[in-house]
Image (tube, rainbow, N blue to C red):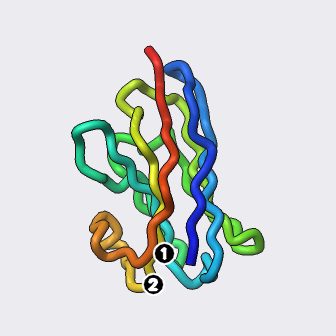
Amino acid sequence: VQLQASGGGLVQAGGSLRLSCVVSGLTTGNSAIAWFRQAPGGERDLVAGITTGGKINYADSVKGRFTISRDNAKNTVYLQMNGLKPEDTAVYYCAAGARIITSTMRLGGQYDYWGQGTLVTVSS
């Protein structure tokens, strides 16, 4: 199983980026997929996730600005990020887990597979 995250980069505050997580070796429709982020010196925190049943959770800090979506035909999960702020600067990781439910989505230890991360830098 491999998760390949891409789409990061340098953007000015207020700008947008779309991250992609291409999954191979498992079916996105049968696994929960989530985006986490880790800022320098910080912990890895949930940004957004979608369960196998389509339930979606967002961190409070990104609600109304970020949108997670899933294209099962392409086995890809996206994170559309609008209205970016300097505090969104972090390495973003995608993760997959077969046993994730809404209440456990924020627990990184519950995920089976992780991508390599993509760096998002937002300048002020």
The location of residue 48, given as percent across then percent down, is 44, 56
Q: Is residue 13 above or below residue 121?
A: above
Q: Nearer the viewer, residue 64 or 2?
A: 2
Q: Is residue 62 left or right of residue 40?
A: right
Give the mark count: 2
Residue 40 higher or lower than 69, as above or below = above
Label 2 with label 1: CB-CB less than 8 Å: yes
Nearest the eye: 56 or 27: 27
Q: Mark 2 belongs to which amino acid?
A: Ala
Q: Position of residue 64 (x, y in %)?
A: 48, 41
* Res. 32 mark: 1
- In this view, the residue farthest toward the right is 73
In primary-sequence order, the first of circles 2 and 1 is 1
Q: Which residue is mark 2?
A: 98
How packed mark 1 is, by other alpha carbons closer than 10 Å (few <14, some 14-19, many 20 or more), is many
Q: Nearer the viewer, residue 39 or 69?
A: 39
| x and y percentages locating residue 101 in the rendered image | 37, 78
Q: Residue at x 23, y 42 (%)?
A: 42
Name the residue rendered at 30%, 53% in the picture: 45
Pick the residue in front: 109 or 34: 109
Residue at 55% from the left image edge and 27% from the top image edge: 10
Q: Is residue 71 left or right of residue 123?
A: right
Separation (CA) of disc 2 from disc 1: 6 Å
For the point 42% across and 44% down, which residue is it? 91
Snapshot quadrant of residue 97: bottom left
Q: Secondary structure at mark 1?
A: strand
Image quarter in which the C terminus is found: top left
Q: Quadrant of the N terminus?
A: bottom right
